[in-house]
């Protein structure tokens, strides 16, 4: 009766066969260098975020400033992968993924700080209104 709802395990055109997947051929040193570049990028995001949230402002602007300040640290990924002969499209995709995850985490942090400030200001205002 529900034959139309059954799916077939066919992959979309252009997708590699999942059964043909092979483990990475990157050397351990290349993987370590790329992972170290990611760690450096994340440390930069953390350091810049902590310094930037002291200033009030639109969370999107603050996050954009932090991301721009740390962008050059992503080049370590490209350098590590280029030395191993990884195509630029692959290293770009990995850099984009790393940037995107960092931006998401950064936005959550900056918005949480702004929400906490707003709550504290509202509480202070409520306390002042009670006194008056």
Image (spheres, grey):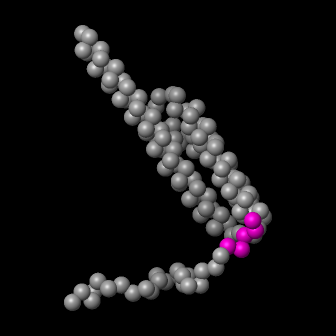
Residue 25 on the magenta segment: yes
User: What is the chief secondary structure element of the magenta stretch?
Assistant: loop
The correct choice, above or below, for 72 with respect to 129 in the image is: below
Left or right: 3, with 100 as reference point = left
> In the rendered image, which quarter contains the N terminus?
bottom left
Q: Nearer the viewer, residue 114 or 67?
A: 114
Q: Residue at x 24, y 86 (%)?
A: 2
Q: Position of residue 132 (x, y in %)?
A: 24, 10
Residue 70 on the magenta segment: no
Instruction: Give the residues in magenta.
Output: 24-28
The correct choice, above or below, for 117 with respect to 112 in the image is: above
Looking at the rendered structure, the number of numbered marks drawn on it comes to 0
**Residue 94 found in image quarter:** bottom right
The correct choice, above or below, for 37 with respect to 58 in the image is: below
Q: Position of residue 102 (x, y in %)?
A: 55, 50
Q: Nearer the viewer, residue 101 or 57?
A: 101
**Residue 47 found in image quarter:** top right
**Residue 21 found in image quarter:** bottom right
Q: Residue at x 36, y 84 (%)?
A: 7
Question: Can the viewer see residue 55 in this picture?
Answer: yes
Question: Can the viewer see residue 58 in this picture?
Answer: no
Left or right: 40, with 126 as reference point = right
Q: Position of residue 117 (x, y in %)?
A: 41, 29
Q: Position of residue 125 (x, y in %)?
A: 31, 19
Q: Residue at x 32, y 25 (%)?
A: 122
Left or right: 120, with 36 as reference point = left
In this view, the residue farthest toward the top is 132
In this view, the residue farthest toward the left is 1
């Amino acid at each position: 009766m529900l034959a139309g709802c059954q799916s077939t395990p066919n992959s979309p055109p252009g997708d590699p066969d999942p059964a043909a997947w092979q483990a990475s051929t990157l050397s351990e040193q290349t993987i370590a260098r790329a992972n170290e570049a990611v760690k450096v990028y994340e440390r930069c995001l953390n350091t810049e975020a902590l310094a930037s949230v002291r200033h009030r402002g639109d969370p999107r602007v603050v996050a954009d400033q932090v991301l721009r300040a740390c962008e050059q640290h992503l080049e370590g990924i490209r350098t590590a992968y280029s030395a191993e002969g990884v195509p630029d499209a692959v290293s770009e995709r990995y850099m984009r993924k790393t940037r995107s995850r960092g931006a998401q985490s950064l936005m959550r942090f900056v918005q949480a700080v702004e929400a906490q400030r707003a709550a504290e200001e509202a509480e202070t205002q409520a306390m002042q209104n009670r006194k008056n």
